[in-house]
Image (spheres, rainbow, N blue to C red):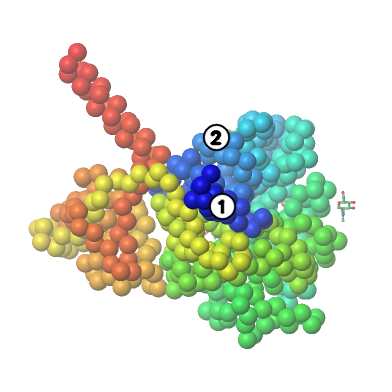
Amino acid sequence: MSAYQISICLIVVGICCSWADGLGVNWGTMATHPLPPKIVVQLLKDNGIRKVKIFDADAATMNALAGSGIEVMVAIPNNMLGYMIDYETAKKWVNQNVTRYNFQGGVNIKYVAVGNEPFLTTYNGSFLNLTLPALQNVQTALNNAGIGDTIKATVPLNADVYNSPVSNPVPSAGRFRADINDLMTEIVMFLNQSGAPFTVNIYPFLSLYDNPNFPVDYAFFDGTSTPVVDNGIQYTNVFDANFDTLVSALNAVGLGNLPIIVGEVGWPTDGDINAKVSYAQRFYNGLLRRLTVNQGTPLRPNQYIEVYMFSLIDEDAKSIDPGNFERHWGIFKYDGQPKYALDPSGQGQNMMPVAAKGVQYLPQKWCVFNPNGGGDMSKLGDNINYACSRSDCTALGYGSTCNGLDANGNASFAFNMYFQVQNQMTQSCFFQGLAVETTQNPSTADCNFTIQIVSSASACSFATLLMVFVSVLALLFF
Ligand SMILES: *[C@@H]1O[C@H](CO)[C@@H](O)[C@H](O)[C@H]1NC(C)=O
Ligand SMILES: *[C@@H]1O[C@H](CO)[C@@H](O)[C@H](O)[C@H]1NC(C)=O
Ligand SMILES: *[C@@H]1O[C@H](CO)[C@@H](O)[C@H](O)[C@H]1NC(C)=O
Ligand SMILES: *[C@@H]1O[C@H](CO)[C@@H](O)[C@H](O)[C@H]1NC(C)=O
Ligand SMILES: *[C@@H]1O[C@H](CO)[C@@H](O)[C@H](O)[C@H]1NC(C)=O
């Protein structure tokens, strides 16, 4: 082996083993052009990511994960909770989506997420009566299938299931939300009994987004001039304060030692004035530094915390009801290109994550506004709205990367986003004569006009087109 080969090996080993042990990622697929699962699994491997949380148990995803050894949290979406209150249905789900992959060379499933933030107040209590019976049935089905010792059912909950009173807003005063206190108590008793962890999603970004007076420094991990003082403990960041509010709530029901895993935590990079690369990098650098040394929190010091970053890849088809930032949570862009350097070993060594390999792009073509094409200018607004309602224009808003475009640039951006979503089909760059295709990249220094990728979905439609073409030829010639 030459010195050169040895150093290559060292580099590869360095990359593969350098991520903090407890560090996982959320892999969501609400995109118009999701990256093919095989490419994503290779991306995880290339970056040494050993844990992944998904939002379903999609067969293509599971097959791609098979044999990788990566630990997986699969999920039952909220809209299926209602079915799971029937034990036979829960049993069938576990058989088809969990047991089926439980073999040598199969999928290394660790957890089943029962619902996703089912007690968000925006759901108006729709899942209050369903979640606990679903959780019980799923764990019982896992137990009866003989895999309950190693695979645990849990419920990823948003951090608003607990709080401290307004009159005493300190972590030690944390309790479960009054309206669901009895239910939460039953749930955590069940989790304790089955040996499952409490899963919570914590979002310092949302603290900042929801409250313009929130001290910016308190969202990060490098100190603040306005710490929260609680029984002599100084809280200098909202992550610790939030986590310990949960510890106190658990303590209040006699389960102060229940294991907690953080199902989602992260920072978006576009779609809001505070959603930007520099903040995302600052946030993760602070978080990863603490995780790698098992710093824990004031109420649980020196502890390993299992954490799933939100998220792996941007998702351009997510609902933007919570805000325009929703489509920009990825550490990677839509095409698997990294956005910023990270320090996954927590040793102060920022490095660019390894990009996705083997991604295929559509041709280098864009669709732009054409003021001289003879189109009816009075229809421009309607056409922009049409394009944006069917694609992702969130980068145009206030505080976002493309907010500096002029009116013509806005129109071009909208038209291009639609054109790319439509796989650059010729008819999709018409807009009543207001648009034209170009091979000149209209991107600016701040604002990227994207070229979409060939996703599994669009590869399918190409295949379909090809089949139609072949059948037509066959008809003509035979
Ligand atoms: C999971 O199992 C159910 C049957 O209970 C099935 O309908 C569903 O398609 C499976 N999910 C996936 C994503 O394969
Ligand atoms: C919750 O209730 C509000 C007001 O009654 C309604 O607008 C909203 O659609 C409801 N949401 C759900 C998820 O049912
Ligand atoms: C949940 O069950 C309780 C008691 O059975 C009932 O009063 C309540 O209306 C139910 N809530 C929903 C949202 O179905
Ligand atoms: C939690 O679970 C353990 C182990 O099963 C049990 O000994 C303990 O009593 C439980 N705690 C509560 C408060 O139920
Ligand atoms: C471009 O669109 C954004 C979002 O709709 C809007 O805020 C901005 O004012 C527009 N810019 C111009 C110059 O029209």
Q: Picture quarter containing residue 92?
A: top right
| Residue type marked 1 | Leu
Residue 249 in percent (x, y) is at 77, 65
Q: Which mark is residue 319?
A: none
- Quick check: can you spot residue 191? yes
Q: Picture quarter containing residue 233?
A: bottom right
Query: Are discs 2 and 1 less than 8 Å apart at CB?
Result: no
- Quick check: can you spot residue 183? no
**Ligand 1 has an atom within 8 Å of the beta carbon of the residue at disc 2:** no
| Residue indicated by mark 2 | 63
Q: Which comes before the other along the chain, label 2 or label 1?
A: 1
Left or right: where 325 falls relative to 179: left
Question: Which of 138/106 is in front?
Answer: 106
Count every numbered label the image shows and give the total.
2
Question: Which of 169/274 is in front?
Answer: 274
Q: Which mark is residue 10?
A: 1
Residue 81 in percent (x, y) is at 64, 44
Q: Is 472 rendered above or below residue 340?
A: above
Q: Is 432 rendered above or below residue 398?
A: above
Q: Is 387 rendered above or below residue 114?
A: below
Residue depicted at x 53% and y 56%: 311
Q: Is 52 rendered above or below residue 87?
A: below
Residue 173 in percent (x, y) is at 77, 74
Residue depicted at x 33% and y 46%: 361
Question: Which of 120/66 is in front?
Answer: 66
Q: Residues within 10 Å of mark 1 (few under 14, many from 20)?
A: few
Residue 238 in percent (x, y) is at 64, 73
Give the distance between the C-alpha atoms of the residues marked 2 and 1, in whole angstroms: 30 Å
Residue depicted at x 71% and y 60%: 305
| Residue type marked 2 | Asn
Secondary structure type for disc 2: helix
Q: Residues within 10 Å of mark 2 (few under 14, many from 20)?
A: some
